[in-house]
Image (cartoon, rainbow, N blue to C red):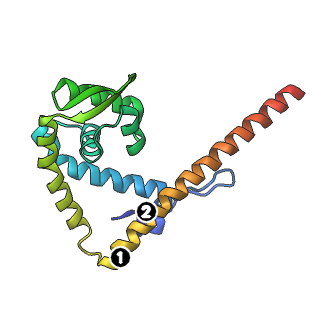
Amino acid sequence: MTASNAPASDSPPRGPDHAVLALERFLPYRLSVLSNRISHAISGIYGDRFGLSITEWRVIAVLGRFPGLSANEVADRTAMDKVAVSRAVARLIAAGRLDRETHGDDRRRSVLTLSEGGYRIYDAVAPTALAFEARLLEGFDEADRALLYRLLDRLDADEIRAEAGLAAMAMADARLSATKGDAA
């Protein structure tokens, strides 16, 4: 049963003191669940064969498309935790799948590229991942696919705007709390 067709009896109990968050209709939850299911399905392609975690594959995938990024830039492009990316990068370097070099004159900044072994994995997994995507979208005609990608681009931009608004609200709340604390 999918989240969108759950029976009404699955509704949370309503009480006068509790908000209702219908997860089956809450977009962040739905996107997260779908992303997790897709990621785990694709991880079967590279997990067993190459012993990669989802985070390690994402690092390889990003560097296969955008070589020469720093670990922080990989984390920014994937919206993954910087510590998780840093650990994945360290494991991939130790396994000979990534190369790290200092960036030009800035000795503090290092850039990452796939090694020959990293490219072998990328070249083996990318076509299978693309085939999975094609199967996933086979029920969508070109107009539906174009609409899906437009909506995803719009959600991406709107999320950045909403996140900035949320940060501003949190700062205002903190200032208000500090002001109330000063008045006491």
Q: Could you tell me which residue is drawn at 22 percent across and 52 percent down?
A: 41
Type of amino acid under label 2: Leu
Left or right side of 183 for 126: left
Residue tagged by mark 1? 144
Toward the front, the furthest residue is 105
Q: Position of residue 134 (x, y in %)?
A: 21, 66
**Labels 1 & 2 near each other (Cβ < 8 A):** no
Q: Could you tell me which residue is drawn at 68 percent across and 44 percent down?
A: 168
Of the pair 115 and 174, the residue shown nearer to us: 115
Quadrant holding the C terminus: top right
Q: Secondary structure at mark 2?
A: helix
Q: Position of residue 55 (x, y in %)?
A: 29, 38
Q: Position of residue 4 (x, y in %)?
A: 42, 67
Residue tagged by mark 2? 152
Is residue 6 visible in the rendered structure shown here?
A: no
Left or right side of 178 for 15: left
Q: Quadrant of residue 182?
A: top right
In 3D space, how far apart are the residues under numbered discs 1 and 2 (Cα atoms)?
12 Å
Type of amino acid under label 1: Asp
Of the pair 19 and 62, the residue shown nearer to us: 62
Q: Secondary structure at mark 1?
A: helix
Q: Could you tell me which residue is drawn at 28 percent across and 30 percent down?
A: 89
Of the pair 68 and 17, the residue shown nearer to us: 68
Toward the right, the furthest residue is 183
Q: Quadrant of residue 62?
A: top left
Is residue 73 visible in the rendered structure shown here?
A: yes
How busy is the neighbourhood of tag 2: few (under 14 within 10 Å), some, or many (20 plus)? Answer: few
Q: Which mark is residue 181?
A: none
Quadrant holding the N terminus: bottom left
How busy is the neighbourhood of tag 1: few (under 14 within 10 Å), some, or many (20 plus)? Answer: few
